[in-house]
Amino acid sequence: MFRSTIFWIHLVCGVVTGAVVLMMSVTGVLLTYERQILAYAERQGFPIEADGAPRMSLEAILAAAKQQRPEFSPATIMVRNEPNAPVTLAAGRNGSLFANPYTGAVAEPGAAGLHQFFDDVTGWHRWFNVEGEGRTTARAITGASNLAFLFLVLSGMYLWLPRVWKWAAFKAHLFFNAKATTSKARDFNWHHVFGIWSAIPLAVVVATATVFSYPWASNLVYRAFGEEPPARGGGRGGPPQAAAAPLTEWGNGTGPTVLGLDELFERAAAHGDWRTLTLTLPTDAAATTVRFAIDAGNGGQPQLRHTLTLDATNGAVATYAPFSSQTPGQQARSWVRFLHTGEALGIVGQTIAGLVSFTSVLMVWTGIALAWRRLVSPLFRRQPATR
């Protein structure tokens, strides 16, 4: 009785949310390597050859950028630990520029079409790419469908267990069956095989998405570690970031005497391994501290992201906040964001996340096919004539 009840709830949830789950799964596959694809495409549009030339100072790069784009006021400077990588000047939501560290030439990052493509795919993945007031309703639908998807994954693990615990029964659900020659038998076999082999990573991907959809799920992450959830911030709808102070007002004689940007970057670089260092330019002309974001990973590995604050007047460490300094709840919440995409585990994690997204496409397809045969096909069978 219990198994039968779970089965019918499983079937109904699959039928009702199948189209939405399919959409989220397909878009999830398309987003698998978004970070790498964009990074490669952007760099192809802005090739840099050192040719033995010395690197310009960061002050000179900023001055050159200001001369070429006087309307652009950068808020951050990001340096990559690669000799032929551009220096990235970002102005928050107002865009970014790539600067050649050897010539000072600047240009906007390339691959505008790819950026738009991935933005659209992300929009579909999260809220059917709906704009305006309808987005709230769309997010409610995708959130509820994702919660139903989590039930489908967990209940599917239970329903996968054969009624008779014998190796032959387990084998039939674990491996592809060459004897499953009919479409019904093939769909049944594929649904079970793809389902069980992807169940655990898929459960992680879907459960972490629930944290994004519902405040109670996000709060539950903190409460699981006995911590009080933080007050919800402004997020995307919050107040805009303050613009950085004009370069002429910080570090150029009008305020306190501070070290040069290159020396500050060198002090930050000496703090451990890193792939990127990002300096947030002070918004106060009288500021005497600067904050660096140190990333030793791929950009999506929270355990390799740290924050360093230096005294700009002498380069001494004011504060250092490695990932390990966060509370267990904060660490877990950071992991959740990048476990969803698999990026927290590097390229292997991304590949696994992409593969289980693809298997979920197959499970939706085979599940709907099985449900059609069970619920709809009998309605069209020819009934025997009655006298």
Image (cartoon, helix red, strand yellow):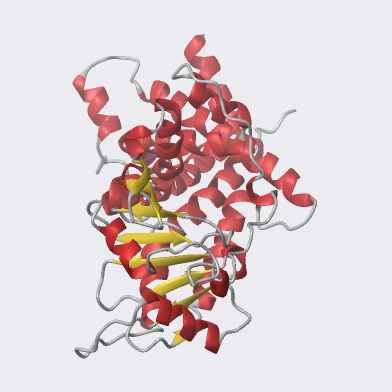
Q: Quadrant of residue 16?
A: top right
Please identify the residue farthest to the right as the structure is shown: 133
Residue 157 image point, x, y percent: 39, 25
- Tell me if residue 377 can be seen: no
Residue 27 image point, x, y percent: 51, 56
Q: Quadrant of residue 70?
A: bottom right
Q: Is residue 15 above or below residue 107?
A: above
Name the residue rendered at 27%, 79% in the picture: 84
Residue 121 image point, x, y percent: 55, 61
Q: Is residue 19 left or right of residue 197?
A: right
Name the residue rendered at 37%, 48% in the picture: 308
- Quarter of the image with the C terminus in it: top right
Please identify the residue farthest to the top as the structure is shown: 1
Residue 326 image point, x, y percent: 40, 32
Name the residue rendered at 21%, 90% in the picture: 51
Q: Is residue 102 above or below residue 85?
A: below
Say which of 26 and 162 sits in front: 26
Q: Is residue 351 above or below residue 100?
A: above
Name the residue rendered at 42%, 22% in the picture: 159
- Tell me if residue 26 can be seen: yes
Q: How many numbered discs sit on the rendered protein?
A: 0
Say which of 16 and 288 sits in front: 288
Q: Is residue 215 above or below residue 138?
A: above
